[in-house]
Amino acid sequence: MRTEALTELAEIVLTVERPHPVRVAIDGCSAAGKTTLADELADVLRARTDREIIRAGIDYFKRAPELRTAYPIESPDSYYRDTWDHDSIRERLLIPLGPDGDRQYVAAVREASARAMSDIPVLTASPDAVLVADGGFLQVPALVDHWDLRIYLYVGWDVVLRRGAARDQAWMESLAAAEERYRTRYIPGERMYVDEVQPRSRAQIVVDNEDPANPTLTVN
């Protein structure tokens, strides 16, 4: 049951001890259910502890489209290697909450479209806070060492295609257009990440989320 899985995850998170805020990554491919799980986990944590729980979506740390010039903008390489602003993720969120950090962080640098800067203020985390951050490609070399707990949501590529296209057709021309985008850009880019980084084996916890009502946990 999902409730039991979330309770188990929360218990694991709360056992992680650091002399600074604990930084938890919810990693996974498109439509794996990262944001939903992260929101629910944050709620369970708030119900179980008085510690400050911080939520951040790494999709709000994307580079402006006009700055993604290393690869053709619609290519899998651009999606994987040039979309997210790793410097900002590190320097404005993860390093401040890590060892010797000043705990002054921002939960976003740009609006969801990445075309405009965010006006979210700089905040100061409590010393024993827990950051629950969700996003794709969170275990790339530029970020992997800045997480204190790495959780990877697994779903198969067929599930990525089905769920992702059904979700994204709302802002695209049609379901067929969304499916084509997943086949030619998102899934090939995410395959590069999975092949290069092996995030499932590097995560401390893997959540099989193919059946969202009954996710299963594996502790590596």
Image (cartoon, rainbow, N blue to C red):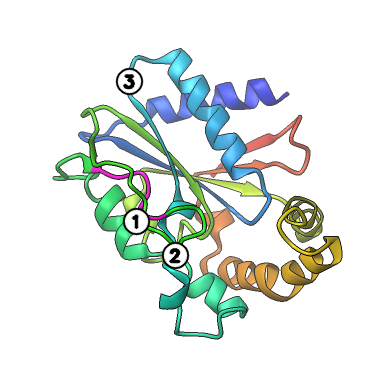
Is residue 213 located in the magenta-colored stretch of the structure? no
Which residue matches tag 1?
Answer: 89
Dot 1: element: helix
Dot 3: element: loop
Would residue 184 be visible to someone looking at this image? Answer: yes
Q: Are marks 2 and 1 in contact (CB under 8 Å)?
A: yes
Q: Which marked residue is nearer to the observer: mark 3 or mark 2?
A: 2
163 on left or right of 27: right
Residue for point 40% across, 25% down: 14
The numbered mark at residue 175 is none
Which residue matches tag 3?
Answer: 51
For the residues labelled 2 and 1, the Cα–Cα distance comes to 8 Å
Instruction: Give, as a three-letter code, the residue at label 1.
Output: Ile
- Quarter of the figure that contains the C terminus: top right
Dot 2: element: loop
Q: How crowded is mark 1: few (under 14 residues within 10 Å), some or many (20 or more)?
A: many
Q: Position of residue 105 (x, y in %)?
A: 25, 43
Q: Residues within 10 Å of mark 2 (few under 14, many from 20)?
A: many
Q: Is residue 190 above or below residue 29?
A: below
The numbered mark at residue 84 is 2
Q: Earlier in the sequence, mark 2 or mark 1?
A: 2
Residue for point 69% across, 35% down: 216
Residue for point 79% across, 71% down: 180
